[in-house]
Image: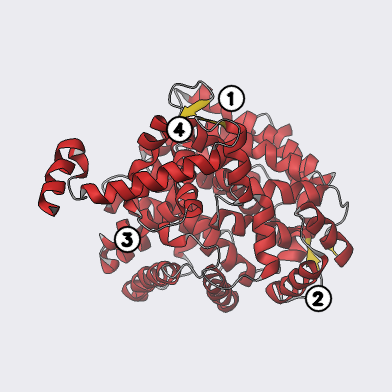
Amino acid sequence: ALLAKAAVSVIIWKQDFMYLRCHYDICLDQLEACFVKLAVTDPSILIFDDFSTVLQSWGISEDHIYAGFNRLDVDQSGRVSLAQFKVSLRDIFSRYPGASDHALFTRFCQSAFEDSMSYASLSSMLATVFGQWRKIRIDQFGKLLYRNFTRHREILTIFKKDRMRTQALLFGAFIHAALDSLREKNFTKTSLEMTSVGLRHRHYGIKPQYLCLFQLSILNTLDDQLNGLSLHSEIAWSVVWTNFVTTSFLRGLLHFDEIRSEMVPTILELLQEARKHENCVRILIKNMKMMCGGRDTIQAVFRDEEHEHRHLGVLLGYLEQVLRKLLENKIASARQTIRLAAKVHWDRKILPRYMLTFQHAMALTFKEMGLAFPQETETTWMVFMHCEVLEILLLEPFAKTQRKVEEWASSLGTDEVDFKAWKSLMQLAQVDDKFAETGWERLHCHCSKPVVQIHDVIKLFGDKGMQHSTWSFERVIQDYCQLLPPGKGDTSFLD
């Protein structure tokens, strides 16, 4: 009887020959029961309002719900029949037998959202990074990374030539250790480890601006080792390295709060002075080409030098606009300005390497123009570009929760977060007073300092929102405050 059912399965669903017909009977029953649960207004037709109401009650974000319904609504009529519902969801329901409707729709909406945005989930990005790293020999990668890194004159002076082999192995081992700590997806542990590494490097004479060149060298070395790096791969590596390694490393290497307190007026004045020079953009282009070292990945972005000159002039104007908004404490508006540029950048193949090259080339340009640009200001420029530009560009698709927190932060008019300000955020997320106090205690343990800054809260929930990209703003905040036991409401087994 089972062989007969298997034969029928092959005839009816040729692409699913591994499944028996009886398995599909169960899946179809589950699909029909799910359709009845969702189609409240009309039992024969599923409309968006019904679909959205149920999925919002499961804590799935509006963007993901909209993408999921669009995938179901093949003919874009706003109405999904039972037959369409079965065809669209049959594969995912059969792939995960026994999973809850909530878990399955979380996965379905995430997949639909990724396709609509042409941007992968964090789990997909980590899988790309781990998969490519397995293809690489650490010793060879370390040697090539050392060569690419020390090609920059200012870097060569900090390493002894007789220790080149040792340093190359250390580079490869550091990247391997950082990626290995991310495999467990214990991001808090990874952050603490990288912060500790940053603290140790305070005594090694490492300047913060070297991190930009190091990340640029990693991407160039990957490009060499893998015979090219696709846009998807470059963004995946950049998101993982920027968010989980560089940011945490910087928190150990620098006194972050002190630098950020003076960052905006310092960089705004510097940028205004630079833009007064008529040769500013021309010098910048020269320095960017010098940093490229003959690679066409940067030079091929624009049609010609006039096109690049125009783009860089607009970019500098954008950055000045962002700084003005930050000076007025319009955090949400400032970051939205950067996010609007993100999709345009990736569509035009303006890769993360281009922005890293721009960051360092602009530092060289400030010096060449004779502006006041001491070591402290160079560090401040690096922090601004990392925290307010590159991170915002890279994490734009994950920013639903972060945008809400930024809007809350913009309404406070202060850089510090007290319990009253915290409670106002909890009210926005519909968190009970008891859990608000639990979250407040957890926040102080997380930050490990007496005064919590606005940017600590934005970063905290930005990371939580990225790790659970299908979750709504309310669910992200509630989950943090309620300290749910591992596994409760969790769908990570589907990632």
Number of residues whose C-alpha sits closer than 10 Å to that of mark 2, classed few (under 14), some (14–19) or many (20 or more): few
Residue 12 appears left or right of 354: left
Q: Which residue is mark 4?
A: 72
From the viewer's side, name the closer residue of 260 and 69.
69
From the viewer's side, name the closer residue of 93 and 246.
93
As shown in the figure, which amino acid type bears the numbered disc 3?
Trp
Residue 357 is situated, as x and y percent measured from the top left of the image, at 50, 45
Q: Which residue is mark 2?
A: 450
Label 2, label 1: how many angstroms apart (C-alpha)?
46 Å
Q: Point out the tag, 2 or 1, that comes first from the N-terminus.
A: 1
- State whether residue 403 appears in this view: yes
Q: Which residue is mark 1?
A: 310
Residue 90 is situated, as x and y percent measured from the top left of the image, at 35, 42
Q: Are marks 3 and 4 in contact (CB under 8 Å)?
A: no
Asked which quadrant contains residue 134, the reply is: bottom left
Label 1, label 3: how many angstroms apart (C-alpha)?
37 Å
Q: Secondary structure at mark 1?
A: helix
